Image (cartoon, grey):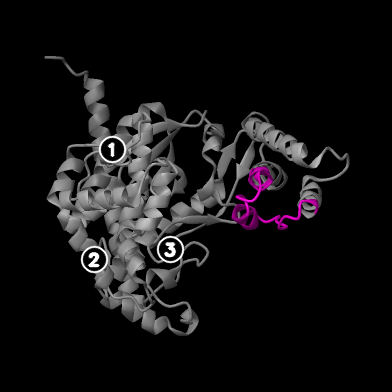
Amino acid sequence: MTKVPKERIFQVSTKVIYLANKFLRQALEALSSLYAFMKGGIDMPEQSVFHLKRLLLLPDNIDMGTSKSRIDKIIQTSRVFRELYLLENQLTPILSGMQKSGLLLSRTWLSEGLQQERLLLLAKEAEIQSYTGNDVGVTPEEKLVSFLKVEKLPEALRIADLKKNKALHPIYAVFMQYKVTKQFIDFWGTKLERESQKDSRGELRLKGQWASFTSFSGRIFASDLPLTSLPRGMRPYIRSEDDRCIYSLDFNQAELRFVAYYSRCEALLLLINERVDLHQQLGNFIASQAATTAHLTEEKARQIGKQFLFSFLYGAGKNRLLQNLQKHLPEMTSIGVERIANAFYTRFPALQIFLRALEKEDTLLTPFGLVKPLAKFTQHQKRNFSFQAGVAVAIKKLMICLHPHFEIIHVVHDELWVLAYPEDRVLLDTMINQFYEEMTVILPKFPTKGFVKIKLLGGI
């Protein structure tokens, strides 16, 4: 039997005591907030960080300034709204910290990172010139307008019009790609360099205006600079200011877990708990229904399965499902889509019953229970709300668990970026396990196994 050094035992014991004290202090702070709230009513949070109207599922025409007593009563009498409100109070300082610190972007993004986009832009300019000729001093936009006039084709400069007319002549598609690429370079290159703060090394500090409950389901979003839409190609260029690593904590099959849990679909819960990749399984089955001879890689099959499942769960019609699948599998037919949908419901019958019931209910389902909204929701919105609200609560719970020990620098729907020293990886795992425990307090027997995926991101 391997002997554990006394120093290591002391370190672990100290860390356990530290975490226990932290957890106790957080619990006392939450109770204190609740007591103060029940005694004195609502202490309105910063509206730039926290949209209370959407949390309470109120219509846009409600005047929050003249309805304070009514809002007090809603939160005091509703456990669901009270829990959501207390969760947002804990989240507010985390979002404020993210807003203050921002993301550090290497200057090499402006040269190396954008190089491929610049080369693509030059290629598209050359393609445009192959149709219009190379008139010196004339912009591509002016060349396009002249060419379309000569060819008696519909004028189009906006992306929507270019897309609408792309079947009439190849130049529409080429110019659409040119315009999209130019907008990307202008925004994520020129605008960033002009408007971002710079440190002593010339690195760029990206800051957005963070807010929670930007939608009724509780989504976190950054405006001004849309950091939640950060291009994936920028990720390797995000930097840490010190020796800490940037870890990405990403939820695995988040919406699927919530729909499986809420619908009590034992077959789906079993697959999730056994860590079966349903996306890849579904992708392979979809390909078999398309009568295609093309070989699909595991990643491609997974991408197709994931896209179909998301569209399917969120209520896309068969025509939309067909259009999405034909982008990957042109041989797919409407009969194939019907077979896939029927096979899915045959395998998981509890899902169909649950999803149809969601659309008909007057109440909305949150992780804290059912609640009746005053705002109007369509059938599709009711169906989607439960998944989105579940993911929103889960990511906030994870942020709150990690916050006392790690700096959170970014959030994108169901993914967090945190700074941590390499030697703190054990502590990171410990706090994720604490998050799992807190999730099962809210939702007993929720499938947490493999819920959070961790990987290194960016550079030091």
Residue 387, relative to residue 429: is it above or below? below
Disc 2 marks which amino acid? Arg
Identify which residue, 374 or 198, lies in the foreground: 374
Q: Residues within 10 Å of mark 1 (few under 14, many from 20)?
A: some
First along the sequence among labels 2 and 1? 1
Residue 213: numbered disc: 3
CA separation, marks 2 and 1? 28 Å
Residue numbers of the magenta segment: 150-178
Q: Which residue is mark 2?
A: 356
Residue at horizontal 47 percent and vertical 77 percent from the top? 60
Answer whether labels 2 and 3 touch (C-beta < 8 Å): no
Residue 367, relative to residue 201: is it above or below? below
Q: Which residue is mark 1?
A: 288
Residue 251 found in image quarter:
top left
Residue at horizontal 38 percent and vertical 30 percent from the top? 294
CA separation, marks 1 and 3? 41 Å
Q: Is residue 154 magenta?
A: yes
